[in-house]
Amino acid sequence: MVIIPATTGQMGVLLGHVATIAELKPGVLSIHDGNDVSKYFVSSGFAFIHANSFADIVVVEAVPLDQIDASQVQKGLAEFNQMLSSASTDLEKAEAQIGVDVHSALNFALSG
């Protein structure tokens, strides 16, 4: 089973899942193989679930949760919040908001 962080909410994919395309949001992607679970933080992407029970998951980046430094996440979140509060153009606001969203999702992933 794979659990993906879709924009519509967490989605579990098992054998026989209906063909689907889902946009991914920043969050944890979990791969369950028997008793083994691998967890990765993904920042964005798409999941293509095919009728033959195969899934293609295309992400911008995937980092094992155990390789993420929580102190760096906190530092990045503070920096992007500061950038957001001082942004003067729409582009600066959008870039800072993306940073806040990703770092907030990272922070949530590490605390859960």
Image (tube, helix red, strand yellow):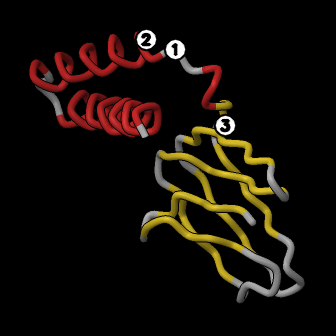
| Real-space Cα separation, disc 3 to disc 2, in angstroms | 17 Å
Q: Which mark is residue 6?
A: none
Residue 11 position in % (x across, y down): 56, 70
Determine the residue positioned at 20% across, 18% down. Answer: 83
Residue under label 1, please give it.
69
Q: CA distance from mark 2 to mark 1?
A: 5 Å
Identify the secondary structure beneath mark 1. Answer: loop
Residue 78: x and y in percent read 24, 16
1 vs 3, front mark: 1
Q: Amino acid at mark 3?
A: Ala
Near mark 1 (Cα within 10 A), the count class, few <14, some 14-19 or many ≥20, is few
Expressed as whole percent of the image width and height from the top left, the position of residue 80 reads 27, 21
Q: Nearer the viewer, residue 60 or 4?
A: 4
- Amino acid carrying label 1: it is Asp
Q: Quadrant of the C terminus?
A: top left
Identify the residue at image location x=33%, y=16%.
74
Q: Are marks 2 and 1 in contact (CB under 8 Å)?
A: yes
* Spot occupied by residue 20 in the image (x, y as percentages of width and height): 66, 81
Q: Quadrant of residue 50?
A: bottom right
Q: Identify the residue position indicated by label 2 in the image.
A: 72
Mark 3 is surrounded, within 10 Å at the Cα level, by few (under 14), some (14 to 19) or many (20 or more) other residues, namely some
Q: Is the C-beta separation of discs 3 and 2 under 8 Å?
A: no
Q: CA distance from mark 1 to mark 3?
A: 14 Å
- The quarter of the displayed image where residue 14 is located: bottom right
Residue beneath disc 3: 62
Q: Contact (CB < 8 A) between labels 1 and 3?
A: no
| Between 87 and 3, the one nearer to me in the picture | 3
Camera-nearest residue between 76 and 28: 28
